[in-house]
Image: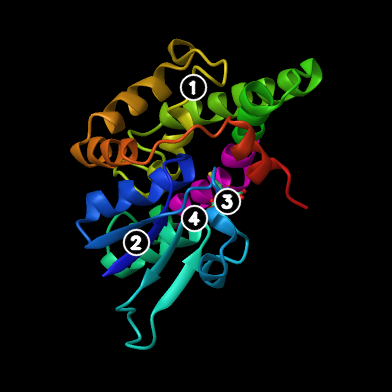
């Protein structure tokens, strides 16, 4: 059994998308980041960076104590290796998958996160910051669109953890000031993943845990940290 520490944000959705696809048994432990639940000692013991998602695997492959992990990319890689799914055993496809997984973790996620911050959460609208991150979002969408012009999925012809990492960051494309019609390959991929039953289940599950992360209380927890 896997315990998933979760809130329905893009990084949280990545892991429910994987678990729903793979059919691994899991239990959700909500971490309401708008209420500051990411700062409890119990959560920090498994996720010292005070961010979700995190998991605890009670049946790790080495047969040892329960294993805890934070960082969504590390979790996706762990679950892919544990289940033997969504990460090809083919040498070259595996490298391609990891390359794009790291691209998502180091580029797409952080840059689009700043887009969300300055477009949606910042109390004052700072034109320079908004333009900077909308431009960067546009550039990253273009890179992904070009890649998806070469293959059905990011790592090749099969759906993989690279797709699961990127998809939830494209879902809020309107809030990011992006027009998906300008990226036809990306749009084709986005529609195909959105239609997968496991994706639908993952997003339906997220609806149970919605909260307003723009409230004054949530902003205090999320953006008042040092
Ligand atoms: N690089 C991390 C980022 C995780 C992350 O930013 N989580 C956010 C929500 S999407 C969070 O838990 N924020 C709570 C906080 O900053 O206190 C990952 O991919 O897991």
Q: Which residue is mark 1?
A: 173
Camera-side mark, 3 or 2: 3
Mark nearer the N terminus (4 vs 2): 4
Q: Is residue 74 left or right of residue 127?
A: left
Does label 2 or label 1 sit earlier along the sequence? Answer: 2
* Residue 205 picture location, percent across and down: 28, 41
The label number, if any, that marks residue 84 in the structure image: none
Instruction: Give the distance between the C-alpha atoms of the residues marked 2 and 1, in whole angstroms.
Output: 27 Å
- Say which of marks 2 and 1 sits in front: 1
Among the two numbered marks 1 and 3 on one chain, the one whose residue lies closer to the N terminus? 3
**Which of the two discs, 3 and 4, labels the residue nearer the N terminus?**
3
Q: From this viewpoint, is residue 155 visible?
A: no
Q: Earlier in the sequence, mark 1 or mark 4?
A: 4
| Residue 226 image point, x, y percent | 78, 53
Distance of mark 1 from mark 3, alpha carbons?
27 Å
- Mark 2 lies on residue: 80
- Residue of label 3: 36
Residues under labels 1 and 4: Cα distance? Answer: 21 Å
Cβ of mark 3 under 8 Å from ligand 1: the answer is: yes
Q: Which residues are magenta?
A: 95-111
Q: Callout 4: helix, strand or loop?
A: helix
Residue 93 vertical position relative to residue 75 in the rendered view, above or below:
above
- Circle 1 — which element? loop
């Amino acid at each position: 059994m896997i315990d998933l520490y979760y809130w329905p944000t893009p990084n949280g959705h990545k892991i429910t998308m994987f678990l729903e696809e793979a059919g691994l048994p899991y239990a959700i432990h909500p971490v309401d980041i708008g209420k500051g639940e990411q700062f409890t000692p119990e959560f920090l013991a498994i996720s010292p960076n005070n961010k979700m998602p995190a998991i605890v695997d009670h049946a790790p492959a080495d047969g040892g104590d329960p294993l805890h992990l934070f960082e969504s990319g590390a979790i996706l890689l762990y679950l892919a290796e544990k289940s033997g799914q969504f990460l090809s055993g083919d040498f070259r496809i595996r490298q391609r998958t990891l390359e794009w997984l790291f691209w998502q973790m180091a580029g797409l996620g952080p840059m689009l996160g700043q887009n969300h911050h300055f477009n949606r959460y910042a109390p004052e609208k700072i034109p320079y910051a908004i333009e900077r991150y909308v431009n960067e979002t546009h550039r990253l969408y273009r890179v992904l669109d070009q890649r998806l012009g070469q293959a059905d999925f990011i790592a090749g012809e099969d759906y993989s953890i690279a797709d699961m990492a990127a998809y939830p960051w494209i879902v809020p494309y309107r809030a990011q000031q992006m027009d998906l019609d300008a990226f036809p390959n990306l749009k084709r991929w986005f529609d195909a993943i959105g239609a997968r039953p496991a994706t639908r289940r993952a997003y339906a599950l997220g609806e149970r845990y919605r909260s307003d992360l723009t409230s004054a209380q949530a902003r205090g927890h999320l953006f008042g940290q040092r």
